[in-house]
Amino acid sequence: MAAIIYKCPNCGGDLRFDPEEQVFQCEYCRSEFSREQTGRFGEGEPEEASEMLYSCPSCGAEIVTEETTAATFCYYCHNPVVLSGRVQGGYHPDGILPFEVSQEKALEIFEQWIAKKRYVPREFYAQDQIEKLTGVYFPYWLYDCQVEGRLDAQGRKQTSWTEGNLRLTRTEEYEIHREGTMEINHVARNALSKANRKLAEGVMPFAMEKMQPFHMEYLSGFMAENRDTEKAAFTMGVESEVRQFAEDSLRSEISGYRTVNVRARETRIENPRWRYVLMPVWTLTYRDKNSDKIYYFACNGQTGKVCGELPVDKGQLRGLFLKVFVPLLAALLTAGYFI
């Protein structure tokens, strides 16, 4: 498999995708190039390598990766490296949503977010910790289809009025029929089993209309993960969700009745289609030394939407308890509440 880096033709520096400018920029001379231009600047030849061992085309150092890693950085020279064999053949993505939020902007979002949180251990947002904020392309399956739906029901209306000493009620029954065709697009499922599901799904939704055809150059300067879960694992659940959505949509079109009794319903899925795509997320993880639990911060690399799970500093909570409860207890004792 080939390990590829993209080099600046002007100075030989490494090229990385700039999310804000949507161009490829040299880290050294600041030259900028379009995606079409970078295709000529890739370096690295196919070589014999184990499934998880590569040689850096820049410095020759060995790069050890996990089985699902598709783009990474050389530990020694820090150049971004794309493992082209991991995104070819059956693993070639159908599309990619390029990063639009830069690392600087993601750090700004993180600082604003963490400033609103209380009792978080200082280690979670220490400088050496937040420097680990990493842009990662996560793999997703997207499902599209058409749904033909039909619903038959009986609706009942009641009208009551008074005539003299009598209370009269008129009941009217109606046959109700609803049917239609729905276009279902971009039902997303995280395709990486090792990813924290809250992290991968908590930053959704993405602006799917900005999806681009996949090109390896977009991975330069970021981490990227390949899928380890196939679409078959999601088909039954997604189809059930789509059918339920279609039924609920038809049911919502019925109104103005006192009661509605659904007698028959039918949904038929037509033209189902799966697409394999990569979508951008800024991630920061923290392993609590006491509980060995991993906490995280995630930021949508396109929209800036944030989600996270934070550790709690028990020392700060104990301090709050002593600061608030002890004076209150003393005041209650003084007033004789516990006599």
Image (cartoon, rainbow, N blue to C red):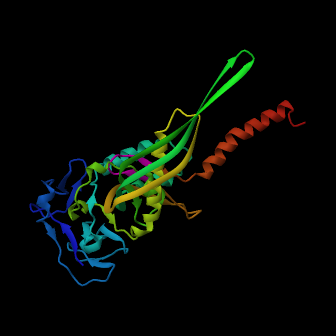
Query: Magenta segment range?
Result: 297-307
Q: Position of residue 87 (x, y in %)?
A: 27, 70
The residue lying toward the viewer, choosing from 312 and 94, is: 94
Q: Position of residue 14 (x, y in %)?
A: 19, 63
The residue lying toward the viewer, choosing from 262 and 215, is: 262
Q: Is residue 79 magenta?
A: no
Residue projecting furthest to the left:
10
Residue 114 shows in this picture = no
Q: Is residue 304 magenta?
A: yes
Question: Vertically, is 173 above or below 243?
Answer: above
- Residue at point 50% right, 35% down? 255
In which quadrant is the N terminus drawn?
A: bottom left
Horizontal placement of 315 versus 180: left or right?
A: right
Horizontal placement of 51 versus 60: left or right?
A: right
Q: How many marks?
A: 0
Residue projecting furthest to the right:
339
Q: Quadrant of residue 44?
A: bottom left
Residue 113 shows in this picture = yes
- Residue at point 36% right, 62% down? 141
Q: Position of residue 65 (x, y in %)?
A: 35, 74
In which quadrant is the C terminus drawn?
A: top right
The residue lying toward the viewer, choosing from 198 and 32, is: 198
